[in-house]
Image (cartoon, rainbow, N blue to C red):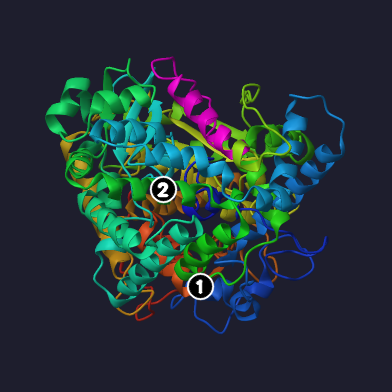
Amino acid sequence: MILSSSRVARRLRIYACFAALLAVVTVARAQGTDTVTNLPARHGIAVANLDTSVKPGDDFYRYANGGWLARTQIPGDRASIGVFSALADRSGKNVAAIIEEEAKSSAPAGSNARKIADLYNAYMDELAIETRAMKPLEPHLAEIAAIHDRRDLAVALGKTLRADVDLLNNAVFSTTNLFGLWVAPGFSDSGHYMPYLLQGGLGMPNRNYYLDDSQHMKDIRVKYVTHVAAMFRLAGLDDPEARAGRVDALEHAIAQTHISLADIEDIAKANNLWSRADFTAKAPGLDWGAYFESAGLSQQEEFMVWTPTALTGESVLVASTPIDTWKDWLTLHLLETYSEVLPRAVAQERFSFFSTVMSGVQQQQPRWRLGVGVVNAFLGDAVGQIYAQKYFSPEAKAEAQAMVANLIAAYHKRIDALTWLAPSTRAEAHAKLDTLYVGIGYPETWKDYSDYEVRPDDAFGNAWRASLWSYHREIARIGKPVDRHEWSMTPQTVNAVNLPLQNALNFPAAILQPPFFDPEAPAVVNYGAIGSVIGHEISHTFDAEGSAFDSKGRVRNWWKPEDHAHFEEQAEKLEKQYDAYEPFPGVHVNGKQTIDENIADLGGVTAAYDGYRASLHGAESPTQDGFTGDQQFFIAYAQNWGSKAREASLRRQVLTDGHSPGQYRADIVRNSDAWYKAFDVKPGEVLYLAPDERVRIW
């Protein structure tokens, strides 16, 4: 992925972290104004965003973005702001127009247009939500209260299972369920869908929030317990503080069973095929028969277990932790998941902790913006079909496809030029590129929502049914042939993704617009901006994770040992380069955790540069605003990452995200020989690396 999927567009999941999904859409500034520069729109690099008082070789990120950073304030309802959020503003405005149009229409019952209108109107009816109070939860709370023994508990836990994980899109854990389920092509049989299970069960983002011993994390844990008690109090439960303490202790124990994000991305550690009998033998404590039956998976004989130590550890906790504590845990996660369609006090309490405490956001977004997020999350393809037709022209698609072809050709040339690759390894790499599916703008087929019931007066029910609809859709695919052209993003999503198990890329329409992709801008700027994004996603095909898959999406070692050793050596150099970055005193970027994205950034900017130079056919790109073509290319790349984040949000990113913060993504150029030449970077400048220290992979 090009962007932090946990902040803007993790494959919009309608089930996990419900509140987070409601905050992805924001509003654009006045027409005719560039939302990135805050100045009248222009074509080319944003000169006004530069700070030329900074030497490019000392801080290239600030050189390219310092002017923008100096004049930009983070709005009160945001954790961060930047180029991607500006595009999300624009996309959100367009989606809002679509919803408004459908809401005014007289579309027939059951049609996508009517469902869009009814879903939005139900969410916007705050009076109805307040009037119903906690009544929508009553039958679900009664089910939890009726749990009397371990078998009942297994049944209840099985009922909560949702397909709320997308491992290769960085959604690496489930926060609503004990375990997370992902349905995807099999590691060995990539032609059929397979169920994957992995760690889950935490309320906070990941294990670091429970186990990190820094004072910052200790303070957050204290506030989390206070938040949990407040949620119990709002639900009308007695002794909320004691309940909160028990749940916090349970989640701390769960966190101790979890593995790190860096380890999760190690495919070799994830390749664990378990039979039904293996669960009882390797993870005793949970009644797996009752669990799978209530989850609708009683006929499934094999699962891929991504995090076996966590499943084993969490199963032990099911047997050893008092049932009443598990009942409190189930209650809390029910409240958290559906807080946005419960009375305002519940939603506000969740916002106060997860947005204010954890990300520094000071105020909630207007209700209508959140409503747009709900529609995008629950009926994303229904909206996307209209969005693509209205806002993505055939001409734009053709231009983007041509650029993709140029970038793939650049990768082929780079592979041929790599002297360290054995002929057999080189042939396999070419095969991956030759069979790579690249989706541009929108999918070839759309989701069918005919079985999803939407009522205009039932916000909670719409959310509950959406969760089940998506889950049943996913488990129904197990064992069926894989659609290698299936998309994991909607057209209105500002992001891009590589799907290793499908050997495929998705570039949604919403990212193929200015400033990333501007048909009126010089070609060099488009190559630096969207070209590097395209190159980034292609490069994921060959990063530490992607290189474990062959051209058919199977997990297979197609490397010669000496080739892999060279790759690992270069990757380790890049890890150390990023380990040295320190956004806060004592808080470093995790080079291992971010290695795949850093490799993709390096490969992306390198291939995009090659593609740009090849497009000139030996000529030089015209100088514009006093900058040479090569300078424009690298500035356009660095301006992709112009952003400001609140301290809490940036700290959270460093701990939980597979992407490095924007300023360090921009500085990947210090590994490019062409960048040194373009800006005359000399020894002694902060970013300078001697030629033998520069990382060269693809």
Instruction: Give the tally of numbered discs.
Output: 2
- Residue drawn at the location 62% of the way across and 36% of the way down: 462
Q: How dense is the environment of label 2, judged by Cα within 10 Å: few (below 14), some, or many (20 and up)?
A: some
Q: How dense is the environment of label 1, judged by Cα within 10 Å: few (below 14), some, or many (20 and up)?
A: some
- Residue drawn at the location 79% of the way across and 65% of the way down: 33
Kindly report the distance in space between the C-alpha atoms of the residues bearing marks 1 and 2. 31 Å
Query: Circle 1 is placed at which residue position?
Result: 646
| Element assignment for label 1 | loop
- Residue drawn at the location 80% of the way across and 46% of the way down: 97
Residue most extreme to the bottom:
53
Residue 132 seen from this side: yes
> Residue 529 appears in which quarter of the rendering?
bottom right
| Element assignment for label 2 | helix
Between residue 166 and residue 619, name the one nearer to us: 166
- Residue drawn at the location 44% of the way across and 58% of the way down: 232
Above or below residue 425? Residue 627 is: below
Between residue 607 and residue 495, name the one nearer to us: 495
Above or below residue 180? Residue 485 is: above
**Which residues, given as a range, are shown in magenta?**
462-489
Q: Which label is found at residue 331?
A: 2
Above or below residue 146? Residue 33 is: below
Q: Earlier in the sequence, mark 1 or mark 2?
A: 2
> Residue 143 appears in which quarter of the rendering?
top left
User: Is residue 454 highlighted in magenta?
Assistant: no
Between residue 697 and residue 69, name the one nearer to us: 69
* Residue 204 picture location, percent across and down: 38, 57
Q: Which label is found at residue 237?
A: none
> For this view, does 315 lie left or right of residue 509?
left
Tell me the amino acid under the disc marked 2: Thr
